[in-house]
Image (cartoon, rainbow, N blue to C red):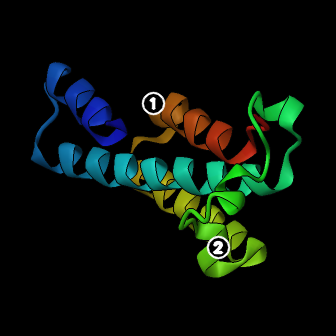
Amino acid sequence: MITFSVVAGGLVAGAGDEDLQRLEKYGQAIGLAFQVADDILDETATSRQLGKDAGSDRENRKLTAVSLLGLEEAGKLLAGLIGEAEEALAVYGTRGERLRQLARYIRERRH
């Protein structure tokens, strides 16, 4: 859904094929980053911070980035995905700042 939203915005703005490819790469990276961040938060945040039971993924034996990779490697994956997203926007300079802010928010969110 995130990738669709980003690409749809590009289509509405009249983006060309190269721009749409960049936006798709960005959207895929932040979409996966959002899920990885959510997996990390489920392990590291409190129930109060999350607004739901912390550790519920583990208790429900859900397959997550943390359960597959461990907390440290999941953090590295998250950082790499944010880097990919920012790299996809590099050609836009300051015009891509709002999208870079969204990527950073995903990395830094605490709930």
The residue that label 1 is drawn on is 95
Q: Residue at x 39, y 49 (%)?
A: 26
What's the residue type where badge 1 is placed?
Arg
Q: Secondary structure at mark 1?
A: helix
Q: Secondary structure at mark 2?
A: helix
13 vs 94: above or below: above
Q: Nearer the viewer, residue 55 or 72?
A: 55
Residue 8 x/y as whole percent: 21, 28
14 vs 41: above or below: above
What's the residue type where badge 2 is placed?
Ser
Q: Is residue 41 left or right of residue 60?
A: right
Q: Residue at x 43, y 55 (%)?
A: 29
Label 2 Cα crowd, 10 Å radius (few <14 / some 14-19 / many 20+): some
The residue at the far top in this view is 12
Q: Nearer the viewer, residue 15 or 55?
A: 55
Asked where in the image residue 23 lies, by quadrant, the reply is top left
Residue 7 x/y as whole percent: 24, 36
The residue that label 2 is drawn on is 67
Q: Nearer the viewer, residue 54 or 26?
A: 54
Q: CA distance from mark 1 to mark 2?
A: 37 Å
